[in-house]
Image (cartoon, coloured by chain):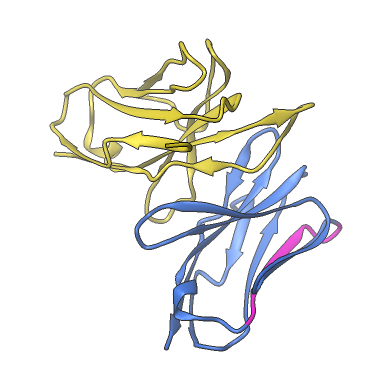
Amino acid sequence: DAGITQSPRYKITETGRQVTLMCHQTWSHSYMFWYRQDLGHGLRLIYYSAAADITDKGEVPDGYVVSRSKTENFPLTLESATRSQTSVYFCASSESEQGVNYGYTFGSGTRLTVV
Amino acid sequence: KNEVEQSPQNLTAQEGEFITINCSYSVGISALHWLQQHPGGGIVSLFMLSSGKKKHGRLIATINIQEKHSSLHITASHPRDSAVYICAAQTYKYIFGTGTRLKVLA
């Protein structure tokens, strides 16, 4: 199916475990983003990527690692999960032309609970 | 102070009412986005504005660049419009408001 797919939709993990959230897009969009959404906060940018092999930190990168070896995939890894990382995670993609990003397309989100 | 502020935070309306959600921002932007998040959690992009006004069905979005203010209007509201509406200011990054939770009662 065309679009942006996140997996898993729901995940429960234990404190200290490594967990990877997957994001796959089929449009060959240049830009991909990871956000977390928590009550009382707007969406907060964790990491973003402008192209394959180019990633950069966002607003709240601590405790997270990303990679982008292929344009279509942008996995987010929590190296040692903490309870404060319990959140809903959204992946998004966007095309860009002459430095202007077009509208976002969001994945369905992954609800992660760290116990 | 947040760089993007939305009001109201919560809004309950009766079916058929005209609804306005406001967004003020304090940064220079290249565009302003309105997003809709349904109870299931999925986020959909509604509008991207850099000036003036856009209309899609019963939804109208306006922006006043000088006043750094945007509004999202819903005409003839319907229970299926119940969702969280989020505005986002596009600079070199996106800055999101915390959202307006709208509930439309039948």
The quarter of the picture where residue B62 lies is bottom right
Q: Is residue B73 magenta?
A: yes
| Chain letter tied to yellow | A
Q: Position of residue A4 (x, y in %)?
A: 45, 36
Give the quadrant of residue B65.
bottom right
Q: Position of residue A115 (x, y in %)?
A: 14, 39
Q: What is the total number of numbered labels drawn onto the structure image? A: 0
Which residue, as the protein is rendered here, is positioned at the far right? B66
Q: Is residue B103 left or right of residue A19?
A: right
Q: Main secondary structure of the magenta part?
A: strand
State whether residue B27 appears in this view.
no
Q: Quadrant of the C terminus of chain B?
A: bottom left
Q: Look at the image and tell me whether residue A45 can be seen.
A: yes
- Left or right of A112 in this view: B39: right
Residue A19 versus residue A55 in the image, above or below: below
Residue B31, how many percent across, how many down?
A: 74, 46
User: Is residue A44 placed above or below B24 in the rendered structure?
Assistant: above
Which quarter of the figure has residue A65?
Answer: top left
Find chain B in the image and tell me its colour. Answer: blue
In the image, what residue occupies the spot 54% across and 13% down? A52
Residue range in magenta is B66-75
Q: Residue at x 50, y 69 (%)?
A: B9
Q: Is residue B7 left or right of residue B101?
A: right
The magenta stretch spans residue A94? no
Q: Residue at x 38, y 49 (%)?
A: A38
Please identify the residue farthest to the front as the structure is shown.
A1
Residue, x 63% and y 84% (percent of image)?
A: B18
| B33 up-or-down from A35: above or below | below
